[in-house]
Image (tube, rainbow, N blue to C red):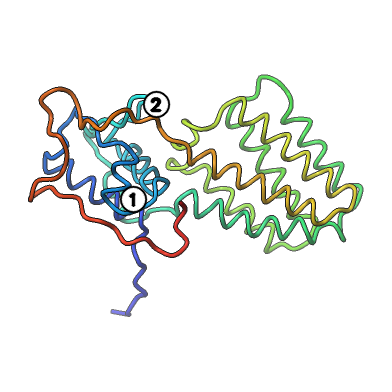
Amino acid sequence: MPIEAVETSRLYRQIADQLRHLIESGEFPVGSRLPSERELADKLGVSRPSVREALIALEVEGRVRIRMGSGVYVVDPPVQAIARLWSDRAPEGPFEVLKARELIESAICSDAVGLVEPADIAALDMVLEQMAASGLSSDDLVALDRSFHVALAGILRNGVLVRCVGDLFDQRISPYFRQLARYFEGPDSWRRAVAEHRAIRDALARGDGAAAREAMRRHLQNSQERFSQSFGDAGKSNGPAGAKAGPNQKNGRMTGSKRKQGEAR
């Protein structure tokens, strides 16, 4: 049997695994509310975005239900639970993906200034016009968003970069990323995204590489900040009256997770 490389478990997976164990052991019974994001982050010694990624993974599994402005509640898992989906094949977290896109696509914008042609600007304009139309579904907007970013990469006439940008963007259509977008994307955020796209387009059209790079960097940082907003967990209660106060007993204690280099904060 050949020896295979061992991948260090992603931090949000470690957090999700620990919370899943506490749920399965009855420390957090069905109907109870988990501690707030802030409390979980403090107990585990990690950032709140990492906790948020773990909670989204658990919701996709059917272990918890996130109620904006109220908290995160434990629910009965589906009959055919997909609890091991993330253990066996967990995707990169959204903050990892967005940070990678920020670095790659801002560099693309800087270099694109020397190669952009009128036809490229026209292609971007067409996408922006479609994105500004009314009555578009979320799926329509995501598809147009992808077209804009891939078209930008195409200005460099480099197939590897086009594929790289497309592949990174396609992580948005995973169940995990879609679940996160449900809470933090809407008409207002899409209007801001279109305005940010236009700022990128305008910088390219006037040949300002530094401005194009900064506009793309700011655009993708704004996405990271949007996904960093709180779910609105209220209070420090673990659930309704009579539920356990928290995982502080000997057999249900949460243990801190060591921060990894590059963790979103």
Figure quadrant of the N terminus: bottom left
**Circles 2 and 1: CB atoms closer than 8 Å:** no
Placement of 49 over or under 134, stated as above or below: below
Report which quarter residue 66 is drawn in: top left
Which is more toward the observer, 59 or 137?
Answer: 59
Q: Secondary structure at mark 1?
A: helix
Q: Amino acid at mark 2?
A: Met
Q: Amino acid at mark 1?
A: Trp
Residue at image coords 75%, 51%:
152
Look at mark 1 in the image and give the residue it sits on.
Answer: 86
Placement of 120 over or under 159, stated as above or below: above
Query: Separation of disc 2 and disc 1 at Cα?
Result: 23 Å
Look at mark 2 in the image and give the residue it sits on.
Answer: 68
In this rendering, position of residue 14 left or right of residue 143? left
Q: Residues within 10 Å of mark 2 (few under 14, many from 20)?
A: few
Residue at image coords 81%, 58%:
112
Image position, residue 13 (x, y; %): 33, 53
In this rendering, position of residue 224 left or right of residue 60? right
**Front tag of 2 and 1:** 2
Placement of 86 over or under 129, stated as above or below: below
Residue at image coords 78%, 51%:
212
